Image: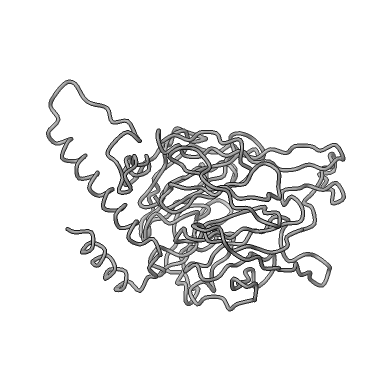
């Protein structure tokens, strides 16, 4: 089938489903075709292999991609489910459906001379040549674009005065986007064409001894007062964009309505940004000029702390924990009504693999709620498929890692 015919056919399918069409729709259609073609070729090859000498395919050194360069490992390793239940933290690519683990981070507290501390994260980013996760110590914050060829990165000292665009095939920053106000977090839009960069006056990962926390035996610095100032919406291709001020509001007891780190993120169609709030209504949307906007109809029953959000076709919404004292469970909602349409195994919904499957945390039976692993769950089934090994229950340790997912 010709490319034009393939895209037209896929557009018709999107229209039938009532789903929004992303700006990089053609690239995604071609990527999906490459994955299907690879699966078919692998299946055919396995059916006829009889020789005793087998050629080993090295990820990243296979056929070239549509843009003339080598194909990334996230495309070459094209199995529907790529799981490594014996690995924690993961060493090799984990993926399910159209979603992959693009990176993960571990945290540690670094004490400062004045008694304060700062939470520093170390990322392990997917090496698209080898299909393995490699330490990226230069970056304090990163996000990976759909297609997993580019990452937006911030250097160690936050707030940062420039945003890097890192090529995941070469491992080099291809371009820097300078900013006038310090940035503490950055995220791609759903189509990968824009960035929202959250600005802060101070490091959003600072722990302040003026806000101490005590367990009765030890006193440690607690979260600093929020210093968020607003956000940029930037065009990835040109680096152009504007900054909007968003003031932090306080409640009746003088408590800020946001956490110390409370980054902005895009709405599902990429036309708005929103922030989480510590109290009702829990989310506030803004247009790109910083004006408050109404919540989109299909996002009224979402919560910023449930990371999976809407399904790819927009017809389902990931809900919160729905288990009990001795069991874990999650729920899936009708996004328009907020009513439960399915109850699933799992502890926390992280990302949609497709319209029927989700990637979630789940715990080891009979153990701590903090000893969990990545699993794949399916609507209508009680079965879970392990994707990773179990994380350490220790809050600040190399064995307790935080995943970052992207469309592959």
Q: Is residue 319 left or right of residue 219?
A: left
Residue at the spot 60% in from the left edge and 67% down from the top edge: 274
Residue 93 pos. (x, y %) = 42, 39
Residue at the spot 64% in from the left edge and 43% down from the top edge: 155
The extreme top residue here reads 52
Kindly tell me whether residue 404 is visible in this rendering.
Answer: yes
Residue at the spot 44% in from the left edge and 58% down from the top edge: 344
Q: Quadrant of residue 272?
A: bottom right
Q: Is residue 1 left or right of residue 102?
A: left
Question: By what rule are the colours in the image chosen?
Answer: one colour
Could you say which is closer to the camera, residue 388 or residue 133? 133
Query: Quick check: 325 above or below 303?
Result: above
Could you say which is closer to the camera, residue 324 or residue 339? 339
Query: Quick check: 80 above or below 49?
Result: below
Residue 141 pos. (x, y %) = 61, 46
Could you say which is closer to the camera, residue 161 or residue 333? 161
Kindly tell me whether residue 79 is visible in this rendering.
Answer: no
Q: How many numbered callouts?
A: 0
Q: Is residue 210 left or right of residue 402?
A: right
Query: Quick check: 143 above or below 258?
Result: above
Quadrant in which the N terminus appears: bottom left
Residue 81 pos. (x, y %) = 34, 45
Residue at the spot 48% in from the left edge and 50% down from the top edge: 405
Residue 157 pos. (x, y %) = 70, 43
């Amino acid at each position: 089938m010709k490319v034009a015919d393939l895209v037209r056919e896929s557009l018709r399918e999107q229209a039938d489903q009532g789903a929004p069409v992303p700006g990089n729709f053609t690239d995604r259609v071609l990527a999906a075709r490459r994955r299907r073609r690879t699966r078919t070729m692998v299946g055919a090859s396995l059916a006829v292999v009889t020789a005793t000498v087998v050629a080993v395919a090295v990820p990243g050194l296979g056929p070239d991609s549509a843009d003339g360069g080598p194909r990334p490992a996230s495309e070459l390793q094209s199995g529907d489910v790529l799981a490594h239940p014996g690995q924690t933290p993961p060493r090799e690519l984990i993926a399910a459906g159209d979603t992959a683990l693009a990176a993960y981070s571990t945290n540690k507290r670094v004490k400062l001379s004045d008694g304060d501390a700062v939470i520093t994260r170390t990322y392990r980013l997917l090496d698209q040549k080898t299909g393995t996760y490699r330490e990226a110590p230069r970056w304090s914050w990163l996000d990976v674009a759909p297609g997993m060829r580019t990452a937006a990165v911030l250097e160690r000292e936050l707030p940062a005065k420039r945003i890097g665009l890192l090529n995941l095939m070469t491992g080099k920053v291809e371009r820097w986007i300078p900013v006038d106000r310090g940035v503490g977090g950055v995220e791609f839009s759903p189509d990968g064409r824009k960035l929202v960069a959250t600005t802060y006056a101070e490091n959003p990962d600072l722990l302040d001894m003026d806000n101490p926390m005590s367990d009765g035996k030890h006193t440690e610095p607690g979260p600093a007062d929020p210093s968020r100032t607003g956000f940029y919406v930037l065009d990835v291709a040109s680096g152009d964009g504007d900054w909007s001020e968003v003031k932090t509001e306080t409640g009746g007891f003088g408590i800020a309505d946001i956490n110390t780190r409370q980054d902005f993120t895009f709405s599902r169609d990429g036309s708005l940004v929103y922030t989480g709030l510590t109290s009702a209504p829990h989310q506030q949307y803004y247009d790109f000029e910083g004006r408050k906007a109404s919540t989109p109809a299909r996002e009224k029953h979402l919560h910023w702390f449930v990371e999976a959000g809407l399904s790819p076709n927009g017809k389902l919404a990931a809900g919160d924990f729905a288990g009990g004292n001795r069991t874990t469970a999650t729920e899936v909602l009708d996004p328009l009504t907020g009513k439960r349409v399915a109850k699933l195994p799992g502890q926390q919904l992280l990302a949609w693999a497709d319209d029927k499957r989700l990637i979630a945390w789940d715990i080891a039976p009979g153990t701590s709620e903090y000893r969990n692993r990545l699993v794949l769950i399916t609507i209508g089934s009680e079965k879970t498929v392990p994707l990773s090994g179990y994380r350490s229950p220790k809050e600040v340790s190399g064995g307790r890692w935080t995943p970052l997912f992207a469309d592959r």
